[in-house]
Amino acid sequence: MASRRRWTYDELLVVLNLYHKLRFGQFDQRQPVIIDLAERLGRTPSSVAMKLSNLASLDPALKLRGINGLKGASQLDRDVWDEFHANPAELVPLSQERFDALFVDAQSETTEVIPGIGIRPASKPPTGETETTRLTKQRRGQGYFRDAVLNNYDNRCGLTGLPVRELLIASHILPWRDHVAERLNVRNGIALNRLHDAAFDQGLISFDEDLRMLLSGRLRDYLPHDAVKLSFEAHQGNELLLASDATPPEQNFLARHRAFFGFP
């Protein structure tokens, strides 16, 4: 198995796709996801983990947190990083296409990246709001966003801790239909269970500057109904569950969500 050959453009697109679906603390050669990808690329897990850490040195969000990654990023690494982030609407679906092609046969199928478990074919098309689910490009974008957001929250609901991936939604803070530039931005996503995703989408709940859950006046009108108390009032004031190396939601996006739905 060749591990010292030069990285190609397509390989870097695939690794960069994975980069945004893992947290920095998961860039480990023993990580099953990295082992799976390395096997399909014909590389060693250590080389893939190292390349992820090289890419981390280019990440301005990590630098703000005092994380520098590994030195040694190539000029091609820099070029692909810049191109990917300058044009995510085109490069994210392309990278997902290259990624999926390593693991599934049909063009209409996509994959799931689950840290600690590995990479597997998605059991069904990603759920969530989308304007063109029939188009492969949009479906790939949704699959990428779902993996990135759910893995950022350890595959559990950020509010309740529910760990059943099949019941989780990668909720958009700024709606998909109205904010094209932020559709694939992990900072525009929160992992929520289906009930709280619907409530967030309708402005029945929101989150404050400290990421604590806010309850709308409309929901308060239903108190003291037991179901509302159990599902919503019990979580009022609770902070979103985020790992120490997770990417937090963008504060400006949350402020716009609160303002749109009239939260004080």
Image (cartoon, rainbow, N blue to C red):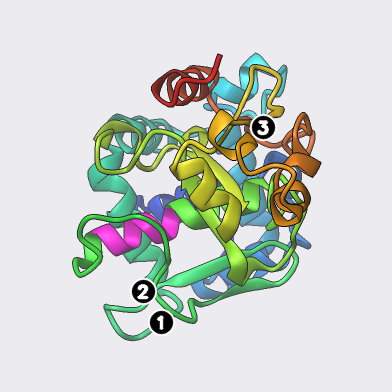
- Image quadrant in which the N terminus is located: bottom right
User: Which callout, 2 or 3, points to the residue nearer the camera?
Assistant: 2
Give the amino acid type for the residue marked by disc 1 in the picture: Val
Q: Could you tell me which residue is drawn at 28 percent across and 78 percent down?
A: 108
- Residue named by callout 3: 70
User: Which callout, 1 or 3, points to the residue nearer the camera?
Assistant: 1
Q: Nearer the viewer, residue 129 or 54?
A: 129
Q: Could you tell me which residue is drawn at 37 percent across and 57 percent down?
A: 142
Q: CA distance from mark 2 to mark 1?
A: 6 Å
User: Does the residue at mark 1 contact the one at mark 3 (Cβ under 8 Å)?
Assistant: no
Image height of 69 relative to 142, above or below: above
- Residue named by callout 1: 104
Q: Residue furthest bottom?
A: 105
Under circle 1, the secondary element is: loop
- Residue named by callout 2: 101
User: Does the residue at mark 2 contact the one at mark 1 (Cβ under 8 Å)?
Assistant: yes
User: Alpha-carbon neighbours of circle 1 within 10 Å: few (<14), some, or many (≥20)?
Assistant: some
Q: Which residues are magenta?
A: 138-144
The disc, 1 or 3, on the residue closer to the chain's N-terminal end is 3
